[in-house]
Image (tube, rainbow, N blue to C red):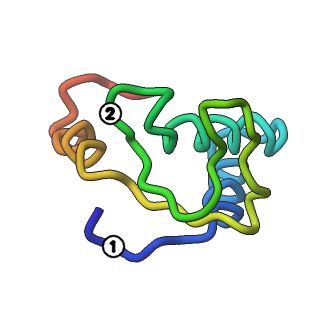
Amino acid sequence: WNKAYKKSARVVGDVIGKYHPHGDSAVYDTIVRMAQPFSLRYMLVDGQGNFGSIDGDSAAAMRYTEIRLAKIAHGLMADLEKETVDFV
């Protein structure tokens, strides 16, 4: 929430390269859903651009949108470094 927006395509590429090497559509669809105020009670991603509408309009292609984490998402990630749970 306190950093600059990044192109969605760059974030999708980073996720595919590091965590999920199975195609970009699932990753981008998830990002779009997290940026829509009508999909989740609290948006986890702060987006700029066309992320669709409640009427069923689809989101713009990832090269036309920009994202960053929402303030609430930082709260979810705040204590990850405490290693309460072992991530494998």
**Residue in front for this viewpoint, 60 or 5:** 60
Q: Is residue 53 left or right of residue 69?
A: right
Disc 2: which residue: 42
**Residue in front for this viewpoint, 22 or 72:** 72
Q: How would you rate the neighbour count of disc 2 (Cα within 10 Å): few for under 14, some for 14-19, many for 20 or more? A: some
- Marked residue nearer the N-terminal end (1 or 2): 1
Give the quadrant of residue 80.
Answer: top left
Please give the label number shown on residue 26: none
How far is the residue under mark 1 from the one under mark 2? Answer: 19 Å
**Amino acid identity at mark 1:** Lys
Disc 1 vs disc 2: Cβ atoms closer than 8 Å? no
Give the quadrant of residue 9.
Answer: bottom right
Disc 1: which residue: 3
Which SS class for mark 2?
Answer: loop
Q: Residue at x 34, y 26 (%)?
A: 41
Q: Position of residue 71 (x, y in %)?
A: 24, 52
Which SS class for mark 1?
Answer: loop
Q: Position of residue 34 (x, y in %)?
A: 50, 38
Give the quadrant of residue 69.
Answer: bottom left
Quarter of the N terminus within the rendering: bottom left
Query: Is 20 above or below relative to 68?
Result: above
